Image (tube, rainbow, N blue to C red):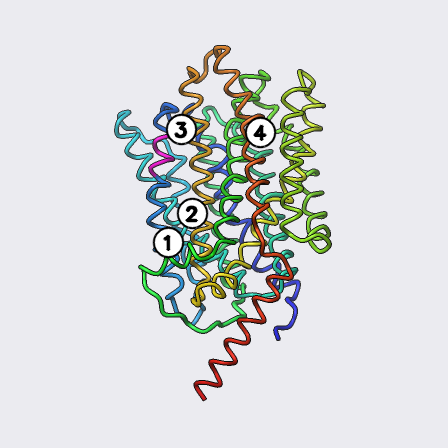
Amino acid sequence: MLRPLKKTELFNYSIGDLGINLNFQLIGFFLAYFYTDVFGISPAHVAGLFLAARIWDAVNDPIMGYVADHTSTRWGRFRPYVFFGAIPLNLLLLACFFVPDLSPSMKLVYAYVTYILHGMVFTAVGLPYSSISAVMTQDQQERAWISTLRMFFAVIIAMSIVSIGTRPFLAKFETEAEGFFALAICYAIASSLLLIYSGIKAKERITPPKEKYHLKDIIPIILKNEALLILSLAMFLNTCIWVIANSVSLYYFKYIMGNADLQSVFFQYMLPANILGVVLTPLLTGKFGKRNVFIFGSAIVVVANLTRHFMAGDSFMLFTGISMVASTTMMFCSICQWGMVPDTVEYGQWKSGIRSEDIPFAFFSFTFKAGMALGGSFAAIVLSLSGYVANTELTETAQTAIIWLFNIVPAIASLGCMVALLFYRLDAEKFSQVLKDLEARAAAKQSADA
């Protein structure tokens, strides 16, 4: 029986998500805008770039999961990827936000190479980092607390820094190109230091028996784990919600509200809403379960987004107030989804007879990045089809597209997320039975070997 996790152990591991998300949030919030309005790529090319990267991830992520599962070092299975991969990951962040003096066609090639390489190294760091949570504890509520702390650092701290601080920071520079690159340098340094610290300090406390499986076993491992499949679908849709909204948020405030600086003001109000979500989530999951809180959060997001679209009108404060409600309950969803995925490790072992920490996390990581890319690509395609032209007075069609991408499309995705979760059956009672069955199998195997 494992002792309860110490607060320092929770902190040392979870703060790594701040390092990951200083990198990740800058990409998620601003790379699409950077490519179209600063770098000079058309929305259609941005959409193609994002899609190509995720097609490659469909191959790259499972292979990385297989490699990590078969890693054995004196530092552990997963931790070396975190502290050794931190600096390469952040050097590629700098490359993504650098504007080279190249021809338009070569700039497009440069964007493809740097963005796809960034995604590969992000997998090599982020996937093992997430997998550590499955070998820290098997207690569902401790996993919920880990997820809560991770989201505190990822969303409350990292997202707030990026969303609130970027516009004022850029204003200090003559051009946005100089500002974005300087900002990337600051985040890259902080991200590297935090990831190296977390990778060194985190503890892999569970040492499950090594399972021998081959690359050809990856697909059956995934397909037999219906809990993982349903949760991944919910993750995909939940990711699309905020990626689509965040990717057009700067467009929304710049072109619809007429003031790009309002984006920073808006996200200042989202900060206390997110904090409230972090505080409430572990209390609610302890009483109602992670799945039910996830469903509830998704339902409120649907209602809030539709209300904001049809009732907020020109009132910035009403618009912001409704958004705060949505932001609070989105935290329920974000925390619960990451708290639920470690449970699918034992469930997958129970169903297939093969234990793999990294294959479930690799598949989850792929759907997460697919949600990011397809959400971003969808937004870029819609902008392109609407006739969007950067830094001009937009047509009515382009303005309508931005408004719908900010409000209606995320509401539809959240509705789909809620429906998917209705089919998720791995609650606390079921998970407890899974653990008992696995213990019985292990005991029977030991007796047979004796």
Identify which residue is drawn at 44% across, 57% down.
224
The residues tagged by marks 2 and 1 sit, at their Cα atoms, a distance apart of: 8 Å
For the C terminus, the image quarter is: bottom left
Q: Quadrant of residue 427?
A: bottom right
Looking at the image, is mark 4 or mark 1 earlier in the sequence?
Answer: 1
What's the amino acid at mark 3? Tyr
Looking at the image, is mark 3 or mark 1 earlier in the sequence?
Answer: 3
Residue 130: image location, x then y, percent: 50, 56
* Residue behind mark 4: 168
Q: Which mark is residue 417?
A: none
What's the amino acid at mark 1? Pro
Q: Is residue 382 left or right of residue 234?
A: left
Mark 2 lies on a secondary structure that is helix
Q: How many marks?
A: 4
Mark 4 lies on a secondary structure that is helix
Q: Residue 366 carries which label?
A: 2
Q: Which of marks 4 and 3 is in front?
A: 3
What's the amino acid at mark 4? Pro
